[in-house]
Amino acid sequence: MHRNFALPWNDIFVFRWGIRTAVRVYTGYDWIRTGYNRIRTGYNRIRTAVRIYGFVLTMAYTLSNMLPLGTIAPDFELPEPGTGNNIRLNDIKGARATVVMFLCNHCPYVLYINAEIVRIAQEYGPKGVQFVGINSNDAETHPDDAPEKMGPHASTVGYTFPYLYDETQEVARQYDAACTPDFYVFDADLKLAYRGQLDGSRPKRNPVEPTGEDLRAALDAVLSGQPAAEVQRPSGGCNIKWKEA
């Protein structure tokens, strides 16, 4: 005896509908997840671009202000974090010339020529030339230039001259300094004979081997009793990181 067997079509339809709905939900979820990932990637790219742009702005390329030749070097007394001593310009000025340099720890333009600065100081120091470096950057906004890091930095790069901290930035203003690095050569009477660049080398802008030719020529002229070259090219690098007024 045969029984009539009826397929549960309603249950089958419900099951198929459930499967299709599940697939659509999963597909929708996948689309949402893909969209979220794309949004997150875009956000990260924008954030990176903003950081880079902000970095470029804070590291804006700046030229020397070119203090008038003949200016008498403003005297100063500043601390040397590496030794704990206070250094006064008039106490350490060179017998034949003095080079005042505005430097800092982090600036790529300074880092690029540090080795040449060290070579020039070692070469001209025995000839009666005194070198002194000054860091005037705001350490609150640029902690890499903080005074406690200056001594170790000077030792690492090989500075053989005083490296002083201008916390108030008053000395930088007296010298009308604008960038790092910025170079000033004074004669035996502390009259300004040269201000400008070490040489034409710049990282990325002109990535040639530093020679110090401009600063060397100025020192040679002063040591021989002659005026430095009439054409003096400004130094260029990162702007001094001034404190907010």
Image (spheres, rainbow, N blue to C red):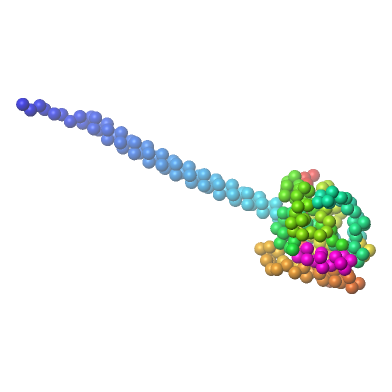
**Residue 118 part of the magenta segment:** yes
Q: Position of residue 93 (x, y in %)?
A: 90, 60
Residue farthest to the right, as pictured: 189
Residue at point 77% right, 56% down?
155
Q: Is residue 81 above or below residue 5?
A: below
Q: Position of residue 228 (x, y in %)?
A: 86, 70
Front residue of this view, candidates 130 and 238: 130
Q: Is residue 226 above or below residue 58?
A: below
Residue at point 31% right, 37% down?
20
Residue at point 89% right, 66% down?
128
Q: Indicate the quadrant where residue 33 lies.
A: top left
Q: Is residue 169 above or below residue 23?
A: below
Q: How many marks?
A: 0
| Residue 59 can be seen, yes or no | yes
Q: Position of residue 59 (x, y in %)?
A: 70, 54
What's the magenta region? 116-129
Q: In the rendered view, does 66 fall on the left or right side of 142?
A: right
Q: In the rendered view, does 50 fall on the left or right side of 225?
A: left
Residue farthest to the left, as pictured: 1
Q: Position of residue 46 (x, y in %)?
A: 57, 48
Front residue of this view, candidates 118 and 50: 118
Quadrant of the image for the C terminus?
top right
| Residue 165 can be seen, yes or no | no
Q: Main secondary structure of the magenta part?
A: helix
Quadrant of the image for the N terminus?
top left
Front residue of this view, candidates 236 and 164: 164
Q: Indicate the quadrant where residue 193 lies.
A: bottom right
